[in-house]
């Protein structure tokens, strides 16, 4: 995967393309992927419901992959703060997609299908926080099913992360 810096994948940013309530610490040029990359993402901060790369795929991920027509990924990533080796699993609060890849329209169809699979929902939601991360799981499955590893631009570490991750002085003090 590309690192985002020095790859030529980043273009000039125009400030009128982002919500005015966002705080930008630098120009987010890497979100402007154009036709160079179908997608730009950051790996997750923490494992959460991520599937460890060295274990067999659990039933939750198996069902999500069945719905997308995919297989477990042949590559792994590392979560950013707890350094867990995982099958590809990306943050979904800040990313960029080329509309031509049709990831969003496919994701909506899959989310609708999953919402109607009551047996799956009841079984998978009893033991883990999957209900909170369903969109993230579906998006991850679509990305790794439809895109090759090198087609996903991995955004730099300072894209869309809390300042507390980079500098301990920002941690709140408990009194």
Image: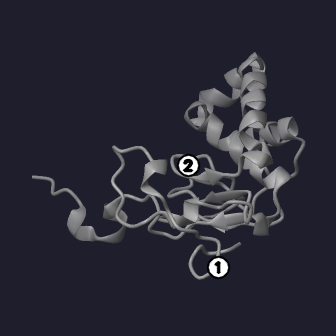
| Mark 2: secondary structure | loop
Please, what secondary structure does the residue beneath circle 1 have?
Answer: loop
Relative side of 118 to 160, left or right: right
Say if 164 sits above or below 105 in the image: below
Q: Quadrant of residue 106?
A: top right
Residue 22 in view of the camera:
yes
Position of residue 62 in the picture relative to residue 124 (left or right):
right
Can you give x and y, in whole percent of width and height, for residue 143 in the image? 76, 51
- Please determine whether, in this image, residue 13 is positioned above or below residue 127: below
Query: Picture coordinates of residue 84 (x, y %)?
Result: 59, 65
Which sits in the foreground, 118 or 13? 13
Q: Nearer the viewer, residue 90 or 103?
A: 103
Q: How is the image coloured?
A: one colour
**x%, y% of residue 160?**
45, 58
Which circle, 2 or 1, is nearer the viewer? 1
Are discs 2 and 1 less than 8 Å apart at CB?
Answer: no
Closer to the chain start, of discs 2 and 1, is 1
Q: Nearer the viewer, residue 175 or 43?
A: 43
Q: Residue furthest bottom?
A: 6
Residue 128 seen by the camera: no
Looking at the rendered image, the quarter that the N terminus falls into is bottom right
Task: Find the distance from the CA under tag 2 to the CA under tag 1.
Answer: 30 Å
For label 2, count other residues whose C-alpha is less than 10 Å away and answer few (under 14), some (14-19) or many (20+).
few
Q: Where residue 72 appears, x then y in whole percent?
A: 83, 54
Residue that label 2 marks: 48
What residue sits 74% from the left and 61% below the top? 35
For residue 56, what is the image quadrant? Answer: bottom right
Neighbourhood count class around disc 1 (C-alpha, 10 Å): few under 14, some 14–19, many 20 upward = few
Task: Residue at 44%, 68% (x, y): give it.
Answer: 158
Q: Is residue 85 left or right of residue 172?
A: right
Residue under numbered circle 1: 7
């Amino acid at each position: 995967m590309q690192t985002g810096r020095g790859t030529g994948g980043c273009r000039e940013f125009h400030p009128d393309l982002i919500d005015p309530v966002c705080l930008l610490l630098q120009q987010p040029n890497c979100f402007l992927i154009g036709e160079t990359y179908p997608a730009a993402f950051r790996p997750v901060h923490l494992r959460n419901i991520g599937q460890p790369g060295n274990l067999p795929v659990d039933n939750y991920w198996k069902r999500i992959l069945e719905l997308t027509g995919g297989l477990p990924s042949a590559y792994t990533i590392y979560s950013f703060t707890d350094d867990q080796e995982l099958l590809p699993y990306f943050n979904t609060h800040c990313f960029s997609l080329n509309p031509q890849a049709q990831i969003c329209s496919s994701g909506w169809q899959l989310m609708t299908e999953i919402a109607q699979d009551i047996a799956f929902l009841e079984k998978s939601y009893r033991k883990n926080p999957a209900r909170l991360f369903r969109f993230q799981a579906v998006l991850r499955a679509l990305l790794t099913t439809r895109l090759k590893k090198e087609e996903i631009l991995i955004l730099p570490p300072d894209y869309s992360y809390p300042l507390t991750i980079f500098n301990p002085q920002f941690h709140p003090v408990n009194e």
